[in-house]
Image (spheres, rainbow, N blue to C red):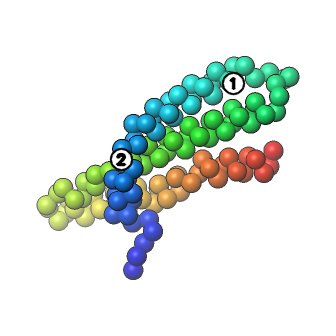
Amino acid sequence: MKYWFHPDVFNNVAITLATYRWKLLTWSIFAFILFFVLQYQITNVTPELLIWLAIFILFSALQALVIAAFIFFFQVLPSSKVQDKKWHKFYRYIEWCEAALFGFILPAPTLLFVYALLTI
């Protein structure tokens, strides 16, 4: 049976996106700094568009950070480097836990932004 959230599938995706990992991390840091600068500028008379722009920048920074973390976690699977069966099983269990965790974390910033758009 094929799983969508299999560690090997995530490994293949991370290898494909590996060239973007540092760019995503840099853009995430830049976007967080930009958000904090904009947050300092926001007052009671600020146009609503600027507020939504700041919120979008925040969620974009979170999404870029999550994708960068995903690439760093799944670029190399520790279970592929170990020869001992006991350690292979242990690393495989950890990889499955990471895959389940990232299955929830990867879409979270985008879904939270959409939820914020719909409810506010």
- Marks 2 and 1, Cα distance to the nearest angstrom? 32 Å
Is the residue 51 above or below the residue 59 in the image?
above
Query: Relative to the observer, which residue lies in front, 91 or 115?
Result: 115
Asked which quadrant contains residue 87, the reply is bottom left
Q: Under tag 2, what secondary structure?
A: helix
Q: Is residue 72 visible?
A: no
Q: Residue 74's spot in the image, x, y percent? A: 35, 52
- Identified at 80% across, 21% down, the residue is 43
Report the disc number at residue 18.
2
The disc at residue 39 is 1
Amino acid at pointer 2: Ala
For badge 1, the amino acid type reads Gln
88 displayed left or right of 73: left
Q: Nearer the viewer, residue 84 or 36?
A: 36
Judge by depth and name the residue closer to the eye, 57 or 96. 57
| Residue 2 screen position, x and y as percent | 40, 76
Q: Quadrant of residue 19?
A: top left
Q: Is residue 19 above or below residue 36?
A: below
Q: Residue furthest left?
A: 83
Where does the N terminus fall, quadrant-wise? bottom left
Q: Secondary structure at mark 1?
A: helix
The x, y position of residue 88, in whole percent, is 22, 62
Residue 44, placed above or below residue 118? above
Q: Is residue 49 left or right of residue 107?
A: right
Circle nearer the N terminus (2, 1): 2
The percent position of residue 16, horizontal first and vertical second, equals: 36, 54
Q: Residue at x 39, y 36 (%)?
A: 22
Q: Quadrant of the C terminus?
A: top right
